[in-house]
Amino acid sequence: MDPYPKTIVRLIDLLNELPGIGRKSATRMAFHILHASHAYSDNLAEAIRAVKHSLRLCKRCFNLSDSELCVICRNPKRDPRILCVVEAPNDLIAIEQTGAFQGLYHVLHGSINPLQGIGPEKLKIEELFQRLQHEPIQEIIIATNPNASGTATALYLQNRLQPFPIRLTRLAQGVPVGGEIEFIDSQTLSTSLKQRTEF
Ligand SMILES: [Zn+2]
């Protein structure tokens, strides 16, 4: 039993549900909030509320957005001829952080996984084909995860995209930068041998 009043136990319990937050950290956070200004705690509560109520999906690429179109789709400097297809908004953020991609995205919101009952109809795949009808897309980069369901999704897309007059590419899979060859699993190593590039 916590020796604290119910009001603070409720907050500790909720914070404790956050990933990576144990009971000790949750208690420390709850007391930090208790001692913080009213402005801070009101702001925090409002920010949590807004993330659920104001955040929506971009109607073009299905990235998370505050408005109809996300910041990337609204940016006129982005190249609308190249589309990078990812499974989740976090994948988009990871690619954005490289600064190496200037095209647009399409977020599928999952990957094909028959064991979990996730077929293509549960993903934003039809929406991708609708974009192909209306947008000047010349290349699609399939950047799904290199695991079983990500690969199944990539193959499904490859099949269905083949009739379209576009360049279809996939992220290269290979040795990680800074890695050591002797410690790389043999599947990754054999893929990188197959996908070797010219100097
Ligand atoms: Zn967008």
Image (cartoon, grey):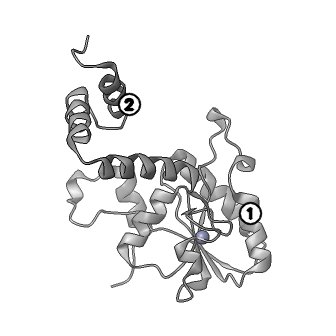
Q: Which residue is mark 1?
A: 127
Numbered disc in front, either 2 or 1: 2
In the depicted structure, whether residue 130 falls above or below residue 186: below
Q: How many marks?
A: 2
Q: Is residue 100 left or right of 161 when viewed as pictured?
A: left
The residue lying at 67 percent from left, 64 percent from top is 158
- Quadrant housing residue 175: bottom left
The residue closer to the viewer here, 16 or 88, is 16
Q: Residue 32 in the image: x percent, y percent?
A: 21, 40
Residue 118 is situated, as x and y percent measured from the top left of the image, at: 67, 41
Q: Which mark is residue 32?
A: none
Counting residues from the start of the chain, the first of labels 2 and 1 encountered is: 2
Tell me where residue 188 appears, x and y as whole percent.
Answer: 37, 55
Q: Quick one: quadrant of the C terminus?
A: bottom left
Q: Residue at x 68, y 66 (%)?
A: 59
Q: Does dot 2 land on a helix, a strand or a loop?
A: helix
Q: Residue furthest bottom?
A: 77
